Image: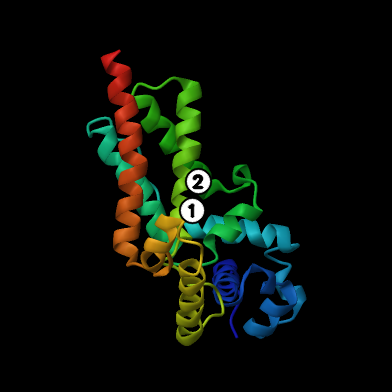
Amino acid sequence: MGKLSREAVVDQALEIGSAEGLQAVTIRRLAQELGVTPMALYWHFKNKEQLIIGMADHLVEGFVITEDYDRPWQEQLRELVAGLIKVLRHYPCAAAVLEEVDHITVPSFLRVWDTGLGLAKQAGFSYEESCLISRYLLQGAIALAAGPANRRPGLSDQDAAEHVRVKRVSLQSLPPDVYPHIVEMAGPLCERGTAEFYDTFGVDLLVTGIETLAARLHRD
């Protein structure tokens, strides 16, 4: 076996986390899967905390949208959010990984955050408003990437279908006089729509809100 790369370690960690959940990712388990001793991994990551940071950085690595002052900020903001969702959706454990780390320790995420701040500033928002907008957008993108279109780690097709069926029956069994709309919409509430529709609708909801606020700001 050739020299073990940092990327190979992180890729394997993300595969395990996506299949079995983040709790299954350990130095010992990684060493076993990669056919090396645990000490071989310490050349790259001294502990699990550093490993999780490496996983988080790898999730967003390569996804860079640089501000372009010649293009509408709305267009760039939509690309930023949609693109971030797309790269995070590749790994079902992405949201769990990003929840475990301080984003300040993740260089790739910092670059995305910085671009979000710049685009909000281009839109005419104050520093305080830009900070809030960037946080809402990035957290929204992370939440969308972990949404219903992603299956829970470890569930087979059959188990996933059964989980949806049980949840739908539970909602339909609620008192209709108390929860009329939940009972009425139990099917679509539980069924997993396509990732494309889920993501597109979510991005529209997030970005349109920012566009509306910006238009109101300029109107006032």
The image's mark for residue 27 is: none
Residue at image x 70%, y 63%?
A: 45
**Image height check: is 116 above or below 197?**
above
Residue that appears at 35% across and 21% down? 124
Q: How far apart, in angstroms, are the residues tagged by discs 1 and 2?
A: 6 Å
Q: Nearer the viewer, residue 36 or 143?
A: 143
| Nearest the eye: 6 or 59 | 59
Query: Which residue in the protein does label 2 denote?
Result: 139
Position of residue 132 relative to residue 220, above or below, is below
Q: Position of residue 191 (x, y in %)?
A: 39, 70
- The percent coordinates of residue 144 (x first, y second) are 43, 55
Answer few, some or many: residues within 10 Å of disc 2's Cα (few below 14, many 20 plus, some between 14 and 19): some
Q: Quadrant of residue 183?
A: bottom left
- Cβ–Cβ below 8 Å for labels 1 and 2? yes
Q: Residue 60 location in percent, x, y? A: 47, 55
**Residue matched to label 1:** 143
Quadrant containing the C terminus in the rendered view: top left
The residue at the point 51 percent across, 23 percent down is 128
Reply above or below: 180 against 68: below
Question: Can the viewer see residue 62?
Answer: no
Q: Residues within 10 Å of mark 1 (few under 14, many from 20)?
A: some
Which residue ends up furthest to the top in the rendered image?
A: 220
Q: Secondary structure at mark 2?
A: helix
Point 50% across, 59% down: residue: 59
Could you say whether the residue bearing mark 1 is in a helix, strand or loop? helix
Residue 208 in view in this figure:
yes
- How many marks the image carries: the answer is 2
Three-letter amino acid code of the residue under disc 1: Ala
Rendered-image quadrant of the N terminus: bottom right
Q: From the viewer's side, name the closer residue of 57 and 98.
A: 98
Dot 2 amino acid type: Gln
